[in-house]
Amino acid sequence: MNKISFLKLIFGLLLFLPFVFSNPAEAADKETYQVDDDNVNVREAPEADAEVVSTLSKGDEIVVFDEQYGWLQTYVGGEVSWIAEQHVFNADKAAEEKAPAEETTETDADSASQEANQEQESSSDSLQGRNIMLDAGHGGKDPGSIALDDEKEKTLTLKYTKSLKEKLENEGATVILTRGNDRYLSLNERVAASESYNTDAFVSLHFNAFTSEENHGISTHFYDEGDDQQLAQSIQEELKSNTDLKNRGVKQDDYYVLRKNEATSVLAELGFLTNQQDLDAIQSEKNMDQVTQSITDGLKNHF
């Protein structure tokens, strides 16, 4: 290779290198997060069972480009990667909160102290710092029960789950979904997802069905006595008080997602799709709001 050809090759490589090492997305207007735990897995997809592509340590920083179902999208090694949001915190917002406050007079300080105490009292029953996993029953090739009008249980459980997620997040909880769309998950995969997180409570949502239209009402199920039973009772008490459906009470059952789950776990049967009165309520926005608010309040009371 002559000298001119060699120089052309070097020049070409210098032009190419910026494209190799540049980030695939523009980060100028994105937020920076800092890893808050050691040995945090970064996965190739926003799923607990997705392949691990890298591991981050406490203090590592990432730039976040998207959020989906409790997962944050970033780039590691130039590849799209996902990290569970409970393992990181927003470094930009944390820096803003640490900015020095303006000096206040003694009167202002007393007033601020009173307001802080009031806020603490009002938020004492919030879910700040709690990791709640919501499990929308069925999905994908598994439709679940079929309603009198042929609507599928899997569609309704996902709809109620998304409503419940919003309410829980408004109370400060970190909410993770076993599924955020119409996809199939085995029972084992649902339990494995719960075990992948420091889950404070696992709540599975379902709707009932029976051969007779006479059966109707709402119930909450648990497997282990203790925390599981107490959470079920707390949720069912709210459902009984704040919804129009028949109270079927708290029941101990051997459901797989409860029996195999190490986290505090309950399963709510939110009415019968084979009873017209229940079905009319289930398909109403009013009932969905009442039910999801009741479960939220039940979780708040339990914690």
Image (tube, helix red, strand yellow):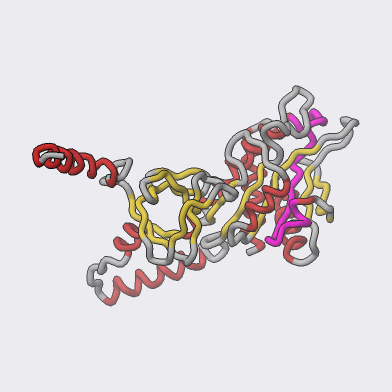
Residue in front for this viewpoint, 119 or 25: 25
User: From what the image shows, is residue 275 above or below residue 116?
Assistant: above
Measuring from the top left, give residue 212's x and y in whole percent.
90, 31
Q: Residue at x 62, y 47 (%)?
A: 293
User: From what the image shows, is residue 54 above or below residue 118?
Assistant: above
Count of all numbered marks drawn on residues in the image: 0
Residue furthest out toward the left: 4
Q: Residue at x 58, y 40 (%)?
A: 180
Q: Quadrant of residue 58?
A: bottom left
Residue in front for this viewpoint, 214 or 165: 165
Q: Which residues are magenta?
A: 257-279
User: From what the image shows, is residue 216 above or below residue 296?
Assistant: above
Q: Quadrant of residue 298?
A: bottom right
Measuring from the top left, give residue 261's x and y in whole percent.
72, 57
Q: Residue at x 44, y 59 (%)?
A: 88
Q: Is residue 145 left or right of residue 118?
A: right
Residue 27 within the segment the image draws in magenta: no
User: From what the image shows, is residue 153 above or below residue 148?
Assistant: below
Q: Quadrant of residue 127?
A: bottom right
Q: Is residue 190 left or right of residue 70?
A: right
Q: Is residue 105 left or right of residue 44?
A: left
Q: Residue at x 32, y 41 (%)?
A: 25
Measuring from the top left, give residue 3's x and y in whole percent.
9, 41
Residue in front for this viewpoint, 144 or 13: 13
Measuring from the top left, give residue 12's x and y in whole percent.
18, 38
Residue furthest out toward the front: 1
Which image quarter is the N terminus in? top left
